[in-house]
Image: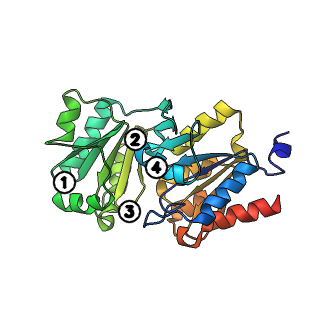
Amino acid sequence: MVAERNDGLRFDLAAFDLDGTLLRRDLEITDRAVAALNGLRERGVRLVIATGRRYESAVEHARRLGFGGEDPVVCYGGSMVRRMGGETLLHRTLPKPLGLEALEWAAERGLHARVLVDGRVITSRDSPAAVRFMRRFEEPGGVVVDSPSEWLANGGEEPTKLVIVDHPDDVEGWLKEAQDAFRGRLFVTRSLPHYVEVGGIEGTKSRALGFLCERWGIDRERVLAFGDADNDVDMLRFAGCGVAVGPMTDGVREAADEVVPNVDEDGVARFVERLLRSA
């Protein structure tokens, strides 16, 4: 019945990262990409955005892709699943002691860390060079404090996620150290060249998709997922078919079943168009 409903397609759910996958560096989304997603909708496939972005930013771009109302959005790298209309279906946070430990780890190394809570970004005035770089990607809802760790220790709410910001060329120098320091306790991964996300072990895109699959009665083998960055690796491995969008790291390539051209060449749209023709 599922295959019949979806006109022979072997997928019931398609998940899409935003930045570098559907969203270009200039924040544009092509008409071809929108049309491709609409083609899947018309064939009965459920669509989900799965992004590291905050909810407020994610829904802005999701609307441009035809999402609305009851459609869920996976945001904060998988720590939250919230409908476009605002209803929260799932929200996982970092335990406060672990959040404090991660903030102190970053501070000891002179790294600029931000605390993301629902609807707000808690940041400090330190690391001016990193902050200047970060402003190119700034979003509303920022709250500046003397010390994010003191804010958290003195009654701040449990973080949805932490983000450590650094110059892209410098991230490689400490990323593995951070992953080793928190292995098995926190999920540490790179999303954008200058962003390293720190979230709870269960706050991942794959766990969020698993939650939706269980809710909708969909087998993971019938999931199609698209991503380009290290924070998409677990999602690509979870899906029955993971599609890596170039350019990509070796880890992303190894996690994927298929590889398509980059976002500027409409790699996602090309794949979906071919899929729809073949069904």
Which residue is depicted at the point 23% across and 33% down? 152
User: Where does residue 100 sit, x and y in percent of width and height?
Assistant: 26, 36
User: Where does residue 25 sit, x and y in percent of width and height?
Assistant: 43, 66
Q: Residues within 10 Å of mark 1 (few under 14, many from 20)?
A: few
Q: Disc count in the image?
A: 4
**Residue tagged by mark 3?**
193
Which amino acid lies under the numbered mark 4 shown in the image of this protein?
Glu
Q: Which label lies toward us, 2 or 4?
A: 4
- Residues 249 and 55: in front is 55
**Residue tagged by mark 4?**
60
User: Where does residue 156 sit, x and y in percent of width and height?
Assistant: 25, 30
**Residue tagged by mark 1?**
110
Which amino acid lies under the numbered mark 1 shown in the image of this protein?
Gly
Q: Is residue 228 left or right of residue 97?
A: right
Q: Is residue 187 visible?
A: no
C-beta proximity under 8 Å, tags 4 and 3: no
User: Where does residue 213 sit, x and y in percent of width and height?
Assistant: 65, 37
Of the image marks 2 and 3, the number of the one nearer the N terminus? 3
**Residue tagged by mark 2?**
199
Which amino acid lies under the numbered mark 2 shown in the image of this protein?
Gly
Q: In which quarter of the image is the N terminus?
A: top right
Q: Residues within 10 Å of mark 2 (few under 14, many from 20)?
A: many
- Residues 218 and 177: in front is 218
Q: Quadrant of residue 257?
A: bottom right
Which residue is depicted at the point 83% across and 45% down? 3
Q: What element carries label 4?
A: helix
For the residues marked 3 and 1, what is the alpha-carbon distance in whole angstroms?
18 Å
